[in-house]
Image (cartoon, rainbow, N blue to C red):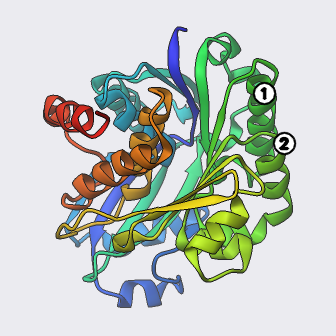
Amino acid sequence: MKYDVFGIGNPLIDVIVSADETVLETFNVQKGSMSLIGFDTATLVKQHLQYHAFKKSAGDSTANTLVGLSLLGNRVVYAGKAGNDADGALFEQDLRSYGVFPDLVRAEDMTGSCMSIITDDAQRTMLTYLGACLSLQQTDLVTGNLEQSRLLHLTGYQLEEPRLQATALYAMGIAKNHGKPVSVDLADAHLVRRNKSLLARVLTEFATIVFANKDEAVAYTDNENPADAAKILGTYAPIAVVKDGANGSYVAHQGFVVHVPAYRVAAVDTTGAGDMYAAGFLHAYLHGALLEKAARVGSYLAAEVVQLYGSRLPLERKEQLCRAVQQLLK
C-alpha cells in the first residue's frame, strides 16, 4: 500500500486565544462547543480578540490526527481545499514539515480559520469560518491515493455542509468498495444533534470505527452513562470509542465494553486531545493491536498534547513518542 491513512479534512488556520468567559457571552456561544460563523462574524471576532495574546498555526481535526499518525511513523495523505493565499501556503508547509503528503486543491476564497478561545478551566470553545474548504468536490479527490491507502479517516465536520457531505459519502463509498476500513470522529455534540439520521446511515453503512467524546456520545444515544453509550454506538459500527476526559475511555466491540483509564497529567489546553487519541488508536489498530492496547496508546498521546498549548505535538518529540508507543504495544 502507498499510504496507511487517507484523511479528508477542512484546511483551517487555528488562532488560539486565552480569554475569560465574557468573550463567549459577547458572541453568545456555549463554552466547549464548535460554532460555524460567516465572514462578517469572523471579522468581528478577530477584531475583538486582536489585543489578546494568541498563537497562529495550521489546524483541523483530521490534519491533527494525520500529524499524530505521521509522528508515529505512518504514511499519510491529507485531502482538502484551501485558499490561494498566505494561510493556504502556511497550511501546506506545516503538513509537509510533519511528513504528511498534501493532496490540497486551491480556491479563490480565503483559507478557513478556527478561533479557539481557551478559558481559565482549560476548556476550548471554537468559532469556525470554513472559507475555501466548503467547495471541496468529488473531482478534487485523488481517488488513486485513497484506493492505495489502508484506511480512510474523516470527521463529522465533513458531513454537515451539503457539498462536503456529498464528497465524504463518495469517498466512503470508494473505501467500502475496495474493502478499506473507515474511521469517523463525530467531532461535536451540536453537530451530532443536527445530523442524527445522516450519522446513523454513515455509521451503519460505512464506518468500521467511530470516535466520540462523552458529550457527542450522549447527544447520539441519549444515554448519560459513557459505557452504555459506547455499547449503543457499537450496535451501529463494529468498533465504538467513547472518550470521557480524565475518566478514561470506553471501547465497545461485539457487545462487550472495556474501560481504559486516562493518564494523570496537569492539563493546560484540551485542544487536540481527541485528535491525538484517534491518532494513537488508529496507529495501534493498523498494527494489529488488541483494542484495549489501542485505547492505551490513544490515551497516551492525548495526555501528552493536553500538557501543551495547541493541538499538535512538536516534531522534535517524534523519537520519544515512537519509543513510548512501542513499549505500550509490547
Q: Does residue 63 sit above or below 73 in this rendering?
A: below
Query: Which numbered marker is on residue 276?
Result: none
Indicate the position of residue 162 as horizontal and vertical percent values.
Answer: 81, 49
Q: Pick the quarter of the image with the N terminus.
A: top right
Residue annotated with mark 2 = 205
How many numbered discs, if any? Answer: 2
Q: Disc 1 versus disc 2: distance between alpha carbons?
A: 9 Å
Indicate the secondary structure of the residue bearing disc 2: helix
Amino acid type, callout 2: Glu
> Looking at the image, can residue 10 be seen?
yes
* CB under 8 Å between discs 1 and 2: yes
Amino acid type, callout 1: Lys
Density class for disc 1 (Cα within 10 Å; few <14, some 14-19, many ≥20) is some
> Looking at the image, can residue 311 be seen?
no
Q: Residue at x 44, y 34 (%)?
A: 289
Q: Quadrant of residue 18?
A: bottom left
Q: Does residue 217 sit above or below 59 in this rendering?
A: below
Q: Residue at x 80, y 37 (%)?
A: 169
Indicate the position of residue 78 as horizontal and vertical percent values.
Answer: 51, 28
Indicate the position of residue 115 as horizontal and vertical percent values.
Answer: 41, 62
Indicate the secondary structure of the residue bearing disc 1: helix
Front residue of this view, candidates 69 and 248 = 248
Q: Is residue 243 left or right of residue 263?
A: right
Residue annotated with mark 1 = 176
Q: Is residue 319 left or right of residue 76?
A: left
Of callouts 1 and 2, the N-terminal one: 1
Q: Residue at x 63, y 58 (%)?
A: 256
Indicate the position of residue 60 as horizontal and vertical percent values.
Answer: 47, 47
Q: Residue at x 45, y 88 (%)?
A: 26
Q: Pick the quarter of the image with the C terminus.
A: top left
Density class for disc 2 (Cα within 10 Å; few <14, some 14-19, many ≥20) is some
Front residue of this view, candidates 263 and 96 = 263
